[in-house]
Image (cartoon, rainbow, N blue to C red):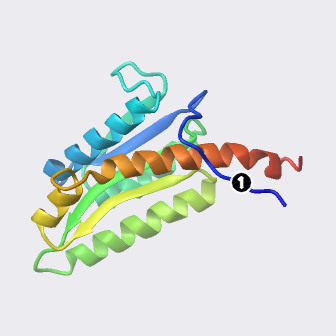
């Protein structure tokens, strides 16, 4: 029996893309800060000239799937983190954006075999979003850990893909 697990310290040759929705940037900016802090503490160069990390801004969460698809198809990245915040309002717009963002991001991961971390907060209020982006805890940190673990796990599973 073989057991496969990822770890958080295998950053050799790792390239990460973080795609951030600008809409609700009060929240998404905090998620990005938590994400970058975690990556830096795990050995990823997060400087503005980093060869390991690219940060891409999109208008909103609805645009996350097309940009993650473009990045995944480039074969440049081992993992992509998609950050967004969709806060419920008085119209059905919330449901449409959340459904399309989640389905689109999941489809990208399946189609290209590149882990895409779903870091889109879906909350009823701005207060709930802020609590998840730093007031109580910063889920951006968790999304970065998931990315590190999944990239490491996918590297470990390369032996399965190659038949070794």
Mark 1 lies on a secondary structure that is loop
- Residue at screen point 39% across, 42% down: 18
Where is residue 52? Give x, y as percent: 48, 27
Between 46 and 131, the residue placed more toward the observer is 131
- Residue at screen point 32% across, 35% down: 37
- Residue at screen point 30% across, 58% down: 61
Between 134 and 68, the residue placed more toward the observer is 134
Q: Please tell me whether residue 31 is drawn above or below residue 108 in the rendered image.
A: above
Q: Please tell me whether residue 158 is drawn above or below residue 48 in the rendered image.
A: below
Where is residue 107? Give x, y as percent: 53, 64
| Mark 1 neighbour density, 10 Å: few (under 14) some (14–19) many (20 or more) | few
Q: Please tell me whether residue 95 is drawn above or below residue 136 in the rendered image.
A: below
- Residue at screen point 17% across, 59% down: 131
Where is residue 154? Give x, y as percent: 66, 48
The quarter of the picture where residue 76 lies is top right
Residue linked to disc 1: 4
């Amino acid at each position: 029996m073989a057991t496969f697990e990822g770890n958080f310290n295998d950053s050799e040759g790792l390239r990460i893309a973080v795609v951030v929705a600008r809409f609700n940037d009060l929240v998404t900016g905090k998620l990005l800060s938590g994400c970058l802090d975690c990556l830096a503490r795990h050995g990823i160069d997060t400087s503005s000239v980093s060869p390991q990390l690219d940060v891409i801004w999109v208008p909103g969460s609805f645009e996350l799937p097309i940009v993650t698809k473009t990045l995944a198809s480039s074969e440049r990245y081992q993992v992509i983190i998609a950050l967004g915040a969709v806060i419920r309002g008085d119209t059905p717009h919330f449901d449409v954006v959340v459904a399309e963002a989640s389905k689109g991001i999941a489809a990208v991961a399946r189609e290209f075999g590149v882990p895409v971390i779903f870091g889109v907060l879906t909350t009823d209020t701005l207060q709930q979003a802020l609590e998840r982006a730093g007031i109580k805890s910063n889920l951006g940190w968790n999304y970065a850990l998931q990315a590190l673990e999944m990239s490491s796990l996918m590297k470990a599973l390369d032996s399965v893909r190659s038949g070794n």
